[in-house]
Amino acid sequence: MYARIILAAGVAALVSATPVAAQWRGTVEFGAFGTRTSYDNSLGMNSNFGMGGRVGAFLSPRLSVEFEVDGGKATRTLGRADVNTSTQAGRLTFVPLRLASNRIAFLAGAGIYHTDTHFFESYGYQGLLGVKLGLSDAVALRLDWIYSHMANKEANLGGNNKSLHFGLAVYRSPGVKMTTVYRTADAVPMPMHSDSVSAAETARLRLIAINYQALRDSLGRPTYPSYLAPTSAAALAIMQRMVLFTRSSSELSPEAKEILDAKVPIFRENPEMRIVITGFASQPGDSG
């Protein structure tokens, strides 16, 4: 019966195994092992050889809770017939040390157990020292030495038993996987200070300067009638003259109209000219 249970558990574990090194929280361990137990002399039994199975769950990468059941046939003293034995145990197991990239792990554990045959039954507590050796990404060999103390003093079963468990352990993950995600972020634009000039603004100002230079050169080659033909300096002076409104009014003064009329021929001779019109109010004037 025990052999069938252990075989079924082992097959189910191998089907959905997870890497030995990936023993994060929630990973489940399934184990199958052979056992040899030496009994206390007060029991009239020598030792037994048997088989067992284990299931455990990791609470953290180093701490797990596990449950074991094993059974076998023990020899007895004074030539008496062998007797069937069984043991059930529950314990906490801690991994204090790992070596060789987590392929070798040392174990320490403590818990409670129950053992019985057809002529006695006892409970007690036990300690464990063990080691695991990873054979692959999902399978490990495990060897445990277990010291058990029987605490059933009413039945005069206060002795100590010693066991060795040796077998395979496989691991199944609850589905948690470590994934590395690579993202490409857009370049962060460099902040522009308020007094800095961008390349586009520099190009715009340079173009204005070139156009202004071309305008000055073209003013020296007028084609309008000779009676309107000013010199280059005179044309520039005409373009620089300001057009003024009548004080406290939006009407142009006669002088302002004459200035505009003088600018018209220059505008016509230079169709590519950039014209910027700005206006302002002078400080003198009527309030209201």
Image (cartoon, grey):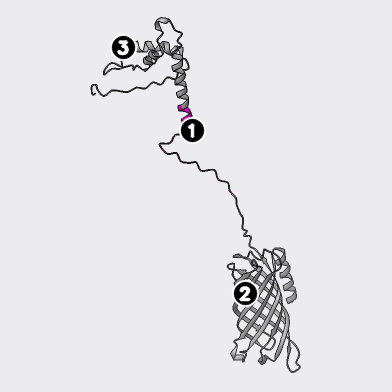
| Distance CA(mark 1)–CA(mark 2) | 68 Å
User: Where is mark 2, residue-wise?
Assistant: 107
> For residue 226: magenta?
no
Label 1–label 2 contact, CB within 8 A: no
Q: Percent position (x, y) of residue 203?
A: 48, 29
* Callouts 2 and 3 close, C-beta under 8 Å: no
- Mark 3–mark 1 distance (CA, rounded to whole Å): 42 Å
Does 15 appear above or below 126? above
Residue 193, relative to residue 241: is it above or below?
A: below
Labels 1, 2: front one: 1
Disc 2 residue type? Leu
Q: Which stretch is magenta?
A: 183-205
Going 37% across and 11% down the picture, which residue do you hit? 262
* Label ID, residue 46: none
In the rendered image, residue 86, in percent from the top left (x then y), is placed at 69, 81
Q: Nearer the viewer, mark 2 or mark 3?
A: 3
162 vs 216, left or right, is right
Q: Name the residue located 45 percent from the left edge and 39 percent from the top edge.
A: 192
The secondary element bearing badge 3 is classed as: helix
Q: CA distance from mark 2 to mark 3?
A: 107 Å
Specify the quadrant of the image occupied by residue 121.
bottom right
Q: Quadrant of residue 279?
A: top left
Question: Mark 1 Cα within 10 Å, few/some/many (few <14, many 20+)?
Answer: few
Q: Reply above or below: 65 against 81.
A: above
Residue 199, numbered circle:
1
Q: Is residue 167 left or right of residue 159?
A: right
Q: Quadrant of the C terminus?
A: top left
| Location of residue 10 by image quarter | bottom right
Magenta-drawn stretch, dominant element (helix, strand or loop): loop
Residue that mark 3 sits on: 255
Q: Tag 1: residue type?
A: Ala
